[in-house]
Amino acid sequence: MRRIIIALPKGKRLLAPAYEVFKKIGYGSDQLEAEIKSGDRKHLEFQCDQKSASFLLVRIADIPQYVDKNWADMGLTAFDCYREYELSSITAKFSMRGDNFVSDILPDLGLCGTSRFCVAGLPEKLDFYNKCKKSEEKIIVVATQHPKIASRYFSGKGMMADIVTVTGSTELMPKYGDADVIFDIVETGRALVENGLVIFEEALPIQTKILVSKAALKYDENVKNMIEVLRDAF
């Protein structure tokens, strides 16, 4: 019997709760549990105890590609990762990435807590931001690590936005860069406060979803059965 290949986020924060999702429905792995407890993270492939599935530990941002390209049958990831991947590129056949996975077959698992995308900035910029929401002539400069999601968000609000891509320390951009606001993931808001920023608006929730390969859904009865069990459990 062919094993189901499941990609899990290898980071400390999400690996344990992501694994528990599958353990809850009978796909436990003593080896993976030992790895989680040790915190080693050097071994990246584990079989479940029933040998009916294998777990791959992958960077969370890479999981959408693993499922999209059928390197894994399914994978657990967060909205910011799979949506940025979907919007990030057009393939040679002019179809969007993400064509080969579905993200809405199962509900949000709630593993990211209160995390959400927010628009934030220095308090004195709030008035300008509100003016930009009402004017098609004003352009707001937005710093973000998620340029495609940010672009889609602001265009959806009818706002003209100049998106500046950074790879970290986004909170510094309103003070030391050219950004009027940042578009970033916020959980507690502590980093914003420590850098003198306030939330202008909460934009999008960060959901944790199981992505499923369309090919696996079509051709693998074991994957279909696992999805039904997951639906009943969650």
Image (cartoon, grey):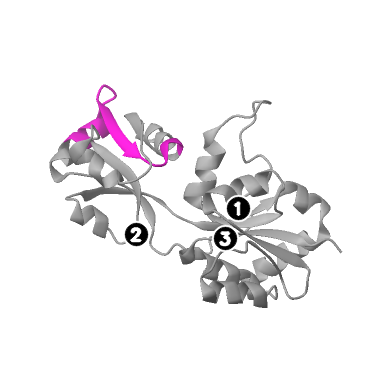
> Vertically, is 197 above or below 96?
below
The answer to whether residue 234 is seen in the rendering is no
Q: Amino acid at mark 1?
A: Asp
Q: Is residue 124 left or right of residue 190?
A: left
Q: Nearer the viewer, residue 230 or 136?
A: 230
Question: Mark 2 or 1 closer to N-term?
Answer: 1
Residue 3 x %, y %: 79, 62
Residue at the spot x=53%, y=54% of the render? 60
Residue bounds of the magenta highlight: 128-148
Numbered badge on residue 104: 1
Question: Mark 3 or 2 closer to N-term?
Answer: 3
Look at the image and say whether residue 131 sits in the magenta stretch. Answer: yes
Q: Badge 1: few (under 14), some or many (20 or more) residues near its Cα, within 10 Å?
A: few
Q: Circle 1 sits in a helix, a strand or a loop, which is it?
A: loop
Residue 55 x %, y %: 67, 63
Residue 187 in which image quadrant: bottom left
Measured Cα–Cα span from mark 1 to mark 3: 7 Å
Look at the image and say whether residue 58 sits in the magenta stretch. Answer: no
Nearer to us of marks 2 and 1 is 2
Measured Cα–Cα span from mark 3 to mark 2: 21 Å
Q: Circle 3 sits in a helix, a strand or a loop, which is it?
A: loop
Numbered badge on residue 187: 2
Q: Is residue 94 left or right of residue 40?
A: right
Q: Circle 2 sits in a helix, a strand or a loop, which is it?
A: loop
* Residue extending farthest left: 124
Residue contact at pointers 3 and 2, CB within 8 angstroms: no
Q: Badge 3: few (under 14), some or many (20 or more) residues near its Cα, within 10 Å?
A: some
Q: Nearer the viewer, residue 134 or 83?
A: 83
Q: Amino acid at mark 2?
A: Glu
* Residue picked out by circle 3: 107
Measured Cα–Cα span from mark 2 to mark 1: 23 Å
Nearer to us of marks 3 and 2 is 2
